[in-house]
């Protein structure tokens, strides 16, 4: 039984058929990447997992329990953390308040305090800016906050939607190192990226998404050497 | 670095001091111009507008709906308060026995607030929730429909007349301050309204539900990714907004001693204007806007332009919105609450 599994998921925006039968799995302890060009349906896939969009057909299971009709806040409770596209931090709240929102469903106490410390260890920049309004931070800092905020919910699986978007190369490397670190502490990661080179570098397995369909899935090493992938996504 | 932080801090202190200073200055100016009696009158009227404006602004902040029925919820509250006073409390006039008065007022507020909160939540459930995914115009039209329905219900059961409301709080209780006679009723009205507003601010700032309301207003999707139950949060917003309209209805009845089924239209429009003036979505702004509009009306009347009161209020609204499209305290949209 996989930690997270999508089977033949179809999602629509009105008449737009955005996901045309997506199937994928994330196992305990894995980093899985979902790669595809703009408009392929990567964000829609993550939003459908989180319940922000509804699958019209197909199944989504978390530890074998079906969640395709579960309310988004319940899906969070079941262990899905989601750092959305565009970061979506609460701009007028401080860094600390944003992180507190990440722990919204948890009882305040020593365990949550320990997680604050863990997040600040991962992202020392956030500690420096603890009481600053999130909206006044740089894009990279906001990205760190979005990831940290998702971690505060103690997710079993973390969905990351283009964490490298709009960041300077040096920051991108830093963020990817942190993703590896988060994973090594036991959280499975489903990483959506346009930056295929970097994503294939840290993930165990990968899926290629084209116009709402998974057209290829494999070990990342094999994907990175696949001529088609090289041509389409690695700019080789 | 340290200097820069210092500069930021002074800037923040300055902006935090600006508002209280501006308000104090404005009030002193008004007291000087209007004299004590009219000043008190404006404060009382402002308290009522402010309480209603809060409901408009909270609902707009969270679902971007101009809830046209909100003024009518206030109107219905005045009639519910009549029912509570006469039927449940068995009182039809001033109560001069202080313990009885206190108990009666507490019950009157409590029951009316709870009833109106439930009415508001019911309206949300039946009329707005099914339209959550529909284009913005649909719930707006529905709100206008609900407004007419509430007016017609009252017209049907009570009639189209001006109806007396039992003034439980003795209107003749006054004390003298210098040359002015100050009715305790005015102080009671202003005091209870301000207390409710402070409790609301604390609730929004400090409680978990208040936080959920703020984040839902800022970014609904992100909020639900934190585990916030959006439907529940919207429902609670309606409960609170309508409860405050309930309190405003009680206060209106106690102060003016009468009501009619069209009351919600007039007061609702003014309160809505107050919400826009203060920066729609911003609760402190709504309170501020409520008082501001009351002062303008009272000042207009004091200078013999009473009939022009509404025209002056709306001209000012236009002028303020031209220079500050987001209202007095509003920031850019998308960042409300
Ligand atoms: N809110 C929306 N309404 C209508 N169509 C949408 C909406 N969001 C995305 N789409 C469409 O769905 C498809 C997939 O989009 P998306 O999941 O955002 O792709 P990606 O994240 O891979 O760039 C695109 O064709 C896009 O235009
Ligand atoms: Mg996307």
Image (cartoon, rainbow, N blue to C red):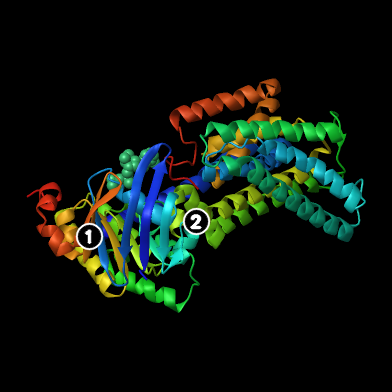
- The percent position of residue B193, horizontal first and vertical second, equals 69, 49
Residue at (55% x, 27% y) in the render: B316
Instruction: Give the residue number, with chain letter if any, for mark 1.
Output: A206
Asked if labels 2 and 1 touch by Cβ distance under 8 angstroms, the answer is no
Name the element at disc 1: strand
Report the side of B156 relative to A99 (left or right). Answer: right
- Residue at label 2? A69
Say whether residue A171 is left or right of residue B250: left
Mark 2 burial class by Cα count in 10 Å: few <14, some 14-19, many 20+? few
The answer as to whether the residues below labels 1 and 2 share one chain is yes
Residue at image location 46% in from the left, 60% down from the top: A67
Q: Position of residue B259 (x, y in %)?
A: 81, 35
Q: Is residue B41 visible?
A: no
Residue toward you, A101 or B132: B132
Which residue ends up furthest to the left in the rendered image?
A236
The quadrant in which residue A121 appears is bottom left
Neighbour tally class for label 1: few under 14, some 14-19, many 20 plus, Cα within 10 Å: many
Q: Chain of mark 1?
A: A
Label 2: state its secondary structure: loop
Ligand number 1: quarter of image = top left
Is A23 in front, or is A37?
A23
Gap between marks 1 and 2 measured at Cα: 26 Å
Which chain does tag 2 point to? Answer: A
Identify the disc placed on residue B313. none
Compared with residue A215, is residue B56 higher up or lower down, i.e. above or below?
A: above
Q: Residue furthest bottom?
A: A110
Quadrant containing the N terminus of chain B is: bottom left
Q: Quadrant of residue A220?
A: bottom left
Q: Position of residue B262 (x, y in %)?
A: 76, 30
Judge whether residue B18 can be spotted in this image. Answer: yes
Respond yes or no on whether mark 2 lies under 8 Å from ligand 1.
no
């Amino acid at each position: 039984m996989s930690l997270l599994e999508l089977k033949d998921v179809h999602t629509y925006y009105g008449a737009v058929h955005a996901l045309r039968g997506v199937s994928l799995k994330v196992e305990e302890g894995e980093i899985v990447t979902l790669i595809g060009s703009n408009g392929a349906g990567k964000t829609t896939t993550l939003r459908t997992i989180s319940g922000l969009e509804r699958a019209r057909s197909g199944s989504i299971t978390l530890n074998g329990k079906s969640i395709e009709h579960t309310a988004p806040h319940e899906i969070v409770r079941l262990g899905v953390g989601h750092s959305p596209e565009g970061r979506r931090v609460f701009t007028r709240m401080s860094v600390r308040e944003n992180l507190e929102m990440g722990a919204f469903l948890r009882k305040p106490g020593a365990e949550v305090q320990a997680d604050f410390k863990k997040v600040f260890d991962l992202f020392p920049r956030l500690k420096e800016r603890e009481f600053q309004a999130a909206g006044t931070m740089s894009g990279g800092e906001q990205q760190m906050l979005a990831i940290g905020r998702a971690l505060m919910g103690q997710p079993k699986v973390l969905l990351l939607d283009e964490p490298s978007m709009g960041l300077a190369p040096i920051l991108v490397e830093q963020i990817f190192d942190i993703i590896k670190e988060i994973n090594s502490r036991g959280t499975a990661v489903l990483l959506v990226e346009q930056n295929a080179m970097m994503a294939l570098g840290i993930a165990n397995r990968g899926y290629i998404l084209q116009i709402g369909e998974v057209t290829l899935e494999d070990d990342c090493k094999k994907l990175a050497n696949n001529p088609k992938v090289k041509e389409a996504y690695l700019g080789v | 670095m340290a200097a820069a932080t210092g500069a930021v801090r002074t800037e923040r202190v300055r902006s935090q001091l600006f508002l209280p200073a501006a308000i104090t200055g404005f009030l002193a100016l008004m007291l000087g111009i209007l004299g004590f009696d009219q000043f008190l009158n404006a404060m009382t009227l402002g308290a009522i507008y402010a309480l209603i404006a809060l409901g408009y602004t909270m609902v707009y902040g969270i679902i971007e709906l101009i809830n046209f029925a909100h003024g009518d919820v206030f109107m219905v509250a005045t009639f519910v308060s009549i029912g509570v006073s006469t039927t449940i409390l068995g009182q039809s006039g001033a109560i001069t026995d202080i313990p009885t008065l206190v108990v009666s007022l507490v019950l009157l507020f409590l029951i009316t607030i709870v009833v109106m909160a439930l009415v508001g939540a019911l309206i949300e459930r039946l009329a707005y929730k099914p339209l959550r995914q529909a284009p913005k115009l649909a719930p707006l039209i529905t709100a206008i429909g609900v407004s007419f329905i509430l007016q017609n219900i009252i017209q049907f059961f009570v009639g189209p007349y001006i109806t007396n409301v039992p003034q439980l709080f003795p209107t003749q209780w006054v004390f003298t301050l210098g040359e002015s006679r100050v009715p305790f009723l005015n102080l009671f009205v202003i005091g209870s309204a301000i207390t409710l507003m402070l409790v609301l601010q604390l609730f929004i700032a400090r409680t978990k539900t208040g936080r959920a309301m703020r984040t839902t207003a800022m970014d609904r999707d992100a909020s639900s990714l934190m585990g916030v139950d959006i439907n529940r949060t919207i429902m609670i917003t309606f409960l609170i907004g309508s409860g405050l309209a309930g309190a405003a209805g009680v206060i209106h009845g106690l102060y003016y001693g009468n009501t009619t089924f069209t009351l919600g239209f007039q007061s609702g429009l003014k309160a809505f204007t107050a919400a826009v003036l203060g920066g729609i979505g911003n609760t402190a702004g709504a309170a501020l806007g409520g008082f501001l509009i009351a002062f303008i009306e009272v000042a207009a009347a004091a200078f013999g332009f009473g009939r022009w009161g509404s025209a002056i209020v709306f001209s000012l609204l236009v002028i303020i919105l031209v220079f500050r499209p987001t209202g007095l305290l509003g920031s850019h949209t998308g960042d409300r609450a």
